[in-house]
Amino acid sequence: MSIEVKICGLSTPETMDAALDAGADYVAVNFFPPSPRSVTSGLAGELMRPVGDRAVKVGLFVDAEDAFIEEVLRAASLDLLQLHGSESVERVEAIRTGFGVPVMKVIKIRGAEDVARVEDFLEVSDRILFDAAPPADLENPLPGGNAVSFDWTYLRGKSWSKPWMLAGGLTVENLARAVELSGAPALDVSSGVEDRPGVKNPDKIRAFVRQAKSL
Ligand SMILES: O=C(O)c1ccccc1NCC(=O)[C@H](O)[C@H](O)COP(=O)(O)O
């Protein structure tokens, strides 16, 4: 089994290098300004420049306007746009065709019934990311990156016409169980490789990728 790994919310050259050297398949930068992980378009350009084709270069957006996406794409070479807000099917399609860059729509899961929402997006999205919905009891939940999981068995035995990833509260300790219960072919992590929100730890990145690749 070869599990793919995406490291989300990278914001320094050191942690980008750690992700690439460890063998991460996707490296992502965050363009949601309220997030402690967000980067400017200029910094994203610098971080993504050395990546080349060693990994898929991902930009994370939350209900972003065209002008902002344009600004980012002028500054940074991105291979995949992660749409992590409340983008409608029409908006996902408009971003994908308008910018000519593949998109990955995020489906936020609280209960088992949320999984079916993926069906609406399969035509217009190149990839799908299943993430935990922001918890209602957190004081200031972000649209993602909250270190919470959903019940991984909701995804078990299911298949879709587009490649997909699992996210939400993954760590080096629980990733094997997450793969076993969900059948995920790819994992996305942010908080689980940090010391605190926005501060990635190179050792934790290496350990996470090593563990995923050992499955
Ligand atoms: O991380 C953020 O700050 C963030 C803000 C707004 C939208 C999405 C955000 N993060 C997404 C991710 O980091 C991952 O795709 C996913 O949610 C994993 O999060 P985590 O539970 O922290 O591993």
Image: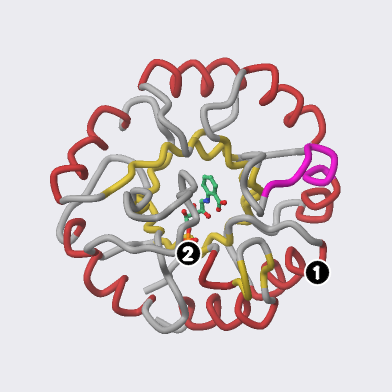
Q: Spatial distance from mark 2 to mark 1, Cα to Cα?
A: 21 Å
Residue drawn where x is 78% and y is 40% of the image: 40
In this view, the residue in front, 2 or 187, is: 187
Which of pointers 2 and 1 indicates the residue nearer the eye? 1
Amino acid type for the residue under numbered disc 1: Glu
Placement of the N terminus among the 4 image quadrants: bottom left
**The residue at label 1 has a CB less than 8 Å from ligand 1:** no
The residue stretch that appears in magenta: 38-45
* Circle 2 Cα neighbour tier, 10 Å, few/some/many (<14 / 14–19 / ≥20): some
Q: Which residue is mark 1?
A: 14
In this view, the residue in front, 124 or 116, is: 116
Q: Is residue 210 above or below residue 56?
A: below
Q: Is residue 50 left or right of residue 6?
A: right
Q: Is residue 30 above or below residue 20?
A: above
In this view, the residue in front, 87 or 97, is: 87
Provide residue 140's location: percent of width, then percent of height. Answer: 48, 49
Q: For numbered disc 1, what is the local secondary structure? A: helix
Amino acid type for the residue under numbered disc 2: Glu
Q: Earlier in the sequence, mark 2 or mark 1?
A: 2
Q: Is residue 66 left or right of residue 181?
A: right
Provide residue 93's location: percent of width, then percent of height. Answer: 44, 19
Q: For numbered disc 2, what is the local secondary structure? A: strand
Outermost residue, front direction?
139
Q: Which residue is mark 2?
A: 4
Provide residue 30's location: percent of width, then percent of height. Answer: 64, 46
Q: Is residue 86 left or right of residue 46?
A: left
Placement of the C terminus among the 4 image quadrants: bottom left
